[in-house]
Image (tube, helix red, strand yellow):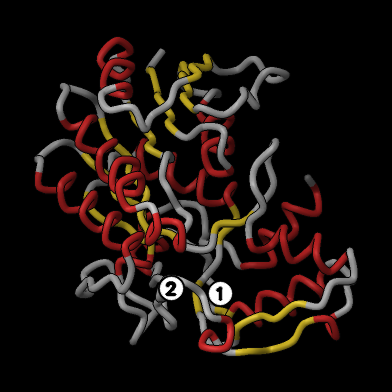
Amino acid sequence: MRKALVTGAAGLLGQHISVRLAAEFSVTVVDIAPNPFEDKQVVSYINADLSTPGRIKEIAAELKPDLIFNCAAYTDVDGCEKNRDLAKRLNVGLVEDLLSIPTGKIIQYSTDYVFDGHNGPYAEDDPTSPVGYYGLTKLISEERLLASGVNALVIRSNVLFGTAVAVRPNFVTWLIDSLRAGKRLNIVTDQFNNPVHAGHLADASIEAAIMDLRGIWHIAGKDYLSRYDIAMIVARFFGLDQSLIRPITTAQLGQTALRPLRGGLKVDKAAAKLQKPIPGFEDGLKLMAAY
């Protein structure tokens, strides 16, 4: 049986990928967090701190996987501005470690934050120009991976949502929990993306990897929405109070790091190549409701 390695496997995307891979691969997963797969017994779990230089190199060198899904990353956009050494270590250093050994195909996850957000949504070949350190680290990892000549697939996505075991809140789960608690929310109207459920991204990622797609591919949802649009749709879908949602601008919110306002990704290339259709936002909400 072919072997797959998943880093950051206790996170939202990592969990969805790991469980799906187990149907066709012998799966080893790595994370510093507690094992979320104990009741499933479908993967081999390694507890490891991947911020330690060389640790993933040791694991991959021993395992010799056919596929490596690198889901480990420092994705706190504001945190990346404050903790640049850690951001660089996790977002760039892990890729450099993997490139230092003979290995199988690497599937690397990136973001629409590699763009400046002036003219989104963006195609794969549009010029990159990150406005913050998070986007910069992801862009550097893309460039080093693709310049190395290894068999690599870079998947850019954005606004990942969904449910899994003991994961930190994402934008959609935060919305649901806050509205159910009766909290009033200030939601920006001028940040645009095309959100995707983690399960849908996992399915598409595995399909793309097995097809041996290479280079940069955009995989996200088909619906281009503002954060305010997302909040209103979530409230309506789950029968929550839309009057608790107040529209504001990004300038009013006062976030530490700059965000690309009109971000998002064009998914035409993936839609034409992959067998499964690109899902809409409410398709992902239906998965959440059934979880």
Report how many numbered discs are placed on residues in the image: 2
Determine the residue positioned at 45% across, 21% down: 48
| Number of other residues with Cα within 10 Å of mark 2, as a class: few under 14, some 14 to 19, many 20 or more | many
What is the three-letter code of the residue carrying label 2?
Answer: Gly
First in sequence, mark 1 or 2: give its number: 1
* Residue 128, numbered label: none
Residue 13 sits above or below residue 225 on the image: above
Q: Secondary structure at mark 2?
A: loop
User: Which percent across, then down, holds residue 153?
Assistant: 28, 45
Q: Which residue is mark 2?
A: 264
Q: Position of residue 230 (x, y in %)?
A: 66, 75
Residue at 20% over, 54% down = 140
Residue 132 appears in which quarter of the rendering? bottom left
Q: Residue 1, how many percent across, how many down? A: 41, 12
Q: Circles 1 and 2: CB distance less than 8 Å?
A: no
Quadrant of res 210: top left
Residue for badge 1: 223
Q: Is residue 284 left or right of residue 97?
A: right
Q: Say what amino acid the circle numbered 1 marks.
A: Asp
Q: Is residue 92 above or below residue 125?
A: above
